[in-house]
Image (cartoon, grey):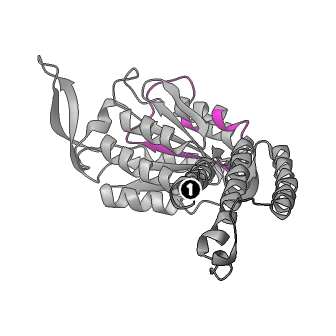
């Protein structure tokens, strides 16, 4: 606990002269009563009230002391602290092309990818993580941040159709590289998740991977799609609903494998929800590096207990003074 105004606590020294004044006053007090003789009172025993009257002054001192503490504003100690921890800079590059609606995953590739990405984010508490989305073009969805709530909220609200359709894998990698370029961690990684073949954009996946390799950025590429046939969206009908047809799943695994190999990363193939979760669990074992993490604890006033104590002492003094120790007129 700390105090917002600790210098006010010096006022507690006033309790000392108050106590001395009370003692001297009691010693010099001379009661007077006009009667013919005091013999009837000579053998009267002392009662508890004679001792209890001094408690009134003690209660008054306690009330004053509590009020002084309230004025000093006691607070729960909150502060910034810096600690060294393990962490890395990561960008998740997620394909949001229409083909990600394919139903070889439950309920589809896109929703399955969102679920495992959210679980991955939740488990990496000390990392800086960002999100890049791509289809026929690429876009930074969320720059690298340690704000898990913002990341999870963005992933939850992400939908297909936000970008022009297509699969610009190279552009997605370049955008992710630009986000990682100024990261402070020694370990920088891109988790590239796609279900197709590069067919849009100016940069090829190979060219983008070489740029990443020059900057020491690893790419962990994931090909999403079952082996064989899958229900794939092919067009929209008159009502704007997707029409699905069974088609052969085609993923340019050679390109994705090369992208990972050039950068010192690794290629994975996910054929269903379970294997996709296993892939992210394996990537979760990425190499880590030391990061300086700033932690903030919130400051909160904590004076109510002292205020209630002051009130209780004062109320008890009034109760004793005017009910049990009421002076005789």
Q: Toward the viewer: 102 or 206?
A: 102
Q: Main secondary structure of the magenta part?
A: loop
* SS of the residue under disc 1: loop
Query: Residue at image x 64%, y 44%?
Result: 301
Which quarter of the figure is the N terminus placed in? bottom right
The percent coordinates of residue 18 (x first, y second) are 83, 53
Residue 184 lies within the magenta run: yes
Image position, residue 182 (x, y; %): 73, 36
Q: Is residue 119 above or below residue 210?
A: below
Task: Depth check: give the residue in front, 320 or 193.
Answer: 320
Any part of residue 294 in sight: no
> Furthest-front residue in view?
36
Residue found at x 36% / y 60%: 275
Instruction: Confirm whether residue 117 shows in the render.
Output: yes
Badge 1: how crowded within 10 Å, few (<14), some, or many (20+)?
few
- Mark 1 = which residue? 326
Please tell me whether residue 247 is drawn above or below residue 119 in the rendered image: above
Q: Which residues are magenta?
A: 179-206
Residue 24: percent from left, percent from top: 87, 60
């Amino acid at each position: 606990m700390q105090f917002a105004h600790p210098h006010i606590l010096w006022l507690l020294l006033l309790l000392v002269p108050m106590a001395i004044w009370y003692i001297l006053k009691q010693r010099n007090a001379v009661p007077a009563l006009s009667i013919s003789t005091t013999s009837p009172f000579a053998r009267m025993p002392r009662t508890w009230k004679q001792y209890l009257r001094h408690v009134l002054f003690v209660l008054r001192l306690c009330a004053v002391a509590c009020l002084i503490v309230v004025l000093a504003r006691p607070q729960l100690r909150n502060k910034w602290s810096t600690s060294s921890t393990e962490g890395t800079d990561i960008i998740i590059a997620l394909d949001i092309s229409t083909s990600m609606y394919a139903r070889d995953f439950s309920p589809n590739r896109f929703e399955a990818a969102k679920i495992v990405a959210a679980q991955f984010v939740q488990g990496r508490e000390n990392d800086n993580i960002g999100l890049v989305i791509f289809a026929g073009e690429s876009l930074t969805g969320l720059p690298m941040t340690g704000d898990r709530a913002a990341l999870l909220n963005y992933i939850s609200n992400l939908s297909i159709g936000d970008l022009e359709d297509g699969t610009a894998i190279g552009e997605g990698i370049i955008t992710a590289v630009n986000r990682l370029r100024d990261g402070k961690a020694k370990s920088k990684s891109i988790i590239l998740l796609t279900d197709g073949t590069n067919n849009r954009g100016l940069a090829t996946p190979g060219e983008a991977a070489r740029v990443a390799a020059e900057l020491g950025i690893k790419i962990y590429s994931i090909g999403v799609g079952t082996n064989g046939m899958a229900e794939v969206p092919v067009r929209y009908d008159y009502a704007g609903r997707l029409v699905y047809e069974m088609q052969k799943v085609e993923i340019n695994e050679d390109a994705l494998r090369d992208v990972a190999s050039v950068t010192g990363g690794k290629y994975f193939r996910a054929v269903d929800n379970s294997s996709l979760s296993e892939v992210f669990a394996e990537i979760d074992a990425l190499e880590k590096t030391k990061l300086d993490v700033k932690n903030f604890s919130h400051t909160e006033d904590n004076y109510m207990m002292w205020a209630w104590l002051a009130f209780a002492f004062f109320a008890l003094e009034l109760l004793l003074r005017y009910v049990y120790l009421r002076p005789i007129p």
